[in-house]
Image (tube, rainbow, N blue to C red):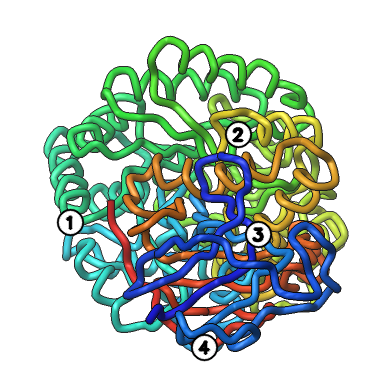
Amino acid sequence: MLDLLITGARLADGTGAPLRPADVGALDGRVVLLPPSTPSQGYGAGSHSPQGYAPGAGSRPDPRARVVLDGAGMVVAPGFIDVHTHSDAASLFGPEFAELAAAPVRMGVTTEICGNCGSSLFPALPERLEELSRSSRTSFGGRVPIFRDFAGFAEAHALAPRANHLASLVGHGTLRAGVVGYEDRAASPYELDVMCGLLGDALAAGAAGLSTGLIYTPGTYGGTDEVVALASVAARYGRPYVTHLRDEMARVEEALEEAAEIARRSGTALHVSHHKTAGRHAWGRTERTLARLAELRAGGMDVTCDVYPYTAGSTSLSAMLPPWANDGGTPALLERLRDPAQRDRMRHAIAEGVPGWENTVGNGGWDLISVASAVGHRELEGRTIASLGGDPVDAAAELLLAEGGQVTIISHSMREDDVRRVLAAEFTMIGSDGVPKPGRPHPRIAGTFPRVLGHYAREEGLLSLEAAVHKMTGMAAGRFGLAGRGVVRDGAHADLVMFDPAVIADAATYADPLLPPRGLAAVVVAGRPVVTGGEPTGATPGGIVTP
């Protein structure tokens, strides 16, 4: 007898192949495909089921399985793989983060890849763990656990129940902070050797690749040669180099060339994170950057990218300041913010620019930057920095000081035509870039995948349902070496999502960012339902997964 059976649905198997009828079962956490049964009475394949209809256990009694979900009118697909998240610690913080940790699962994500943008929770030299825990740029406020190695990271997550799976990249910024510290200087040959050794150990233990965040300190202090040396280690393990480019604004093309050089010299596969051309000086440049990526692929380079389906980004407020302001980490930043002369330097740098710096405010303005999370000043969440009164640099400085440097913002910096171009590119997969912090996080944490399926596939016709599912599943699993995931076939991992293709849509907004999607009927992880009818079941079969 099967543990679970979904009957009467159409299957999007994750390969991009056309939909076909199939019954999908699960036994001992693995998929069992069966011939299609007759659709249950009331909702034929392709019909519109009423909003709020949720298949559930026992809705079609069947002697073949212990739990039966009625999939009539639904599509069954592999569970979505979110290739870009910052959920490294979401399940480690206890009940107060439960709603944030549940948001990705409620939109169908069965595997999250964290450790992005150069920031992971490991590794570090033992003598630097305390400093790193105090100063690390993370997705969470307060004190964050930093682990000596991948094994410590995996052990901590094994003790913290979670509904979906988690894989992690190794963050270059964390490596650098854990060996060199937060100083603006080149790593010594010895320090670089130590960084390469820690990276190799983490990859051997199961980390999924190397990531950089070359606009964030201390990653921004590392030069091209340093990253090439580290990417060469990733290449030896067959893992990708995943990069938040050094500039996604006025110098995005130059930054893309640096990434291509790193891939070429190191021999590793290249993956460009949340590809965008942001700020008024870069709008429209996706026509050139996508053409360049296609050219690199045609020339034999293994290069892909991901995208989130929104025209606003989200990051830390401290990243709006010039790199030198963050030299030395968060404590040093806070000291500079207390000094009026240093604030004046920051004001001048934002107004005039700094060579090599992605100047988000200079490319847009403080009126396009709103507070997403400031746990001690919840009344400011949702307001723009420009609306806080007085000089905006002073307003930003005072807020950072009051919050100990831990403020997350949303930046409205992109244009819709650029987002559409990246989404439609054949080598693009989907990543939410979700930042699970309290307050008003970016709605992408709860809406990314349903938004692609509902708005861009069904309503706009930008891509087919099958192509959209492939970008969210099989393509993502292939890029990160997650064997047996991202596809629905006999013997694959039984991570599944079931949705109504006529209803599926995002509901999360900037004002109410955790609203669950519409039309998502069930999410299954390791053969167990973790969401039915849009609500978590309380099951926690997820864990750490490795290539």
Q: Residue furthest front?
A: 38
Residues at discs 3 and 4 in contact (Cβ within 8 Å): no
Image mark for residue 358: 2
Please report whichever mark, 3 or 1, sits nearer to the chain's N-terminal start. Answer: 3
Please report whichever mark, 2 or 4, sits nearer to the chain's N-terminal start. Answer: 2
Crowding near pointer 2: few (<14 within 10 Å), some, many (20+)?
many
Image mark for residue 205: 1
Q: CA distance from mark 2 to mark 4?
A: 43 Å
Can residue 183 be seen by looking at this rendering? Answer: no
Please report whichever mark, 4 or 1, sits nearer to the chain's N-terminal start. Answer: 1
Q: Give the image quarter of residue 150.
A: bottom left
Amino acid type at image mark 2: Glu
Q: Residue at x 34, y 51 (%)?
A: 482
Q: Residue at x 74, y 64 (%)?
A: 73
Image mark for residue 104: none
Residue carrying label 3: 75
Q: Residue at x 46, y 87 (%)?
A: 66
Q: CA distance from mark 4 to mark 1?
A: 30 Å
Q: CA distance from mark 3 to mark 2?
A: 42 Å
Label 1 sits on a secondary structure element that is: helix
Residue 68, relative to residue 311: is it above or below? below
Task: Look at discs 3 and 2 and give the one toward the viewer.
Answer: 3
Please report whichever mark, 1 or 2, sits nearer to the chain's N-terminal start. Answer: 1
Task: Look at discs 1 and 2 and give the one toward the viewer.
Answer: 1
Residue carrying label 4: 538
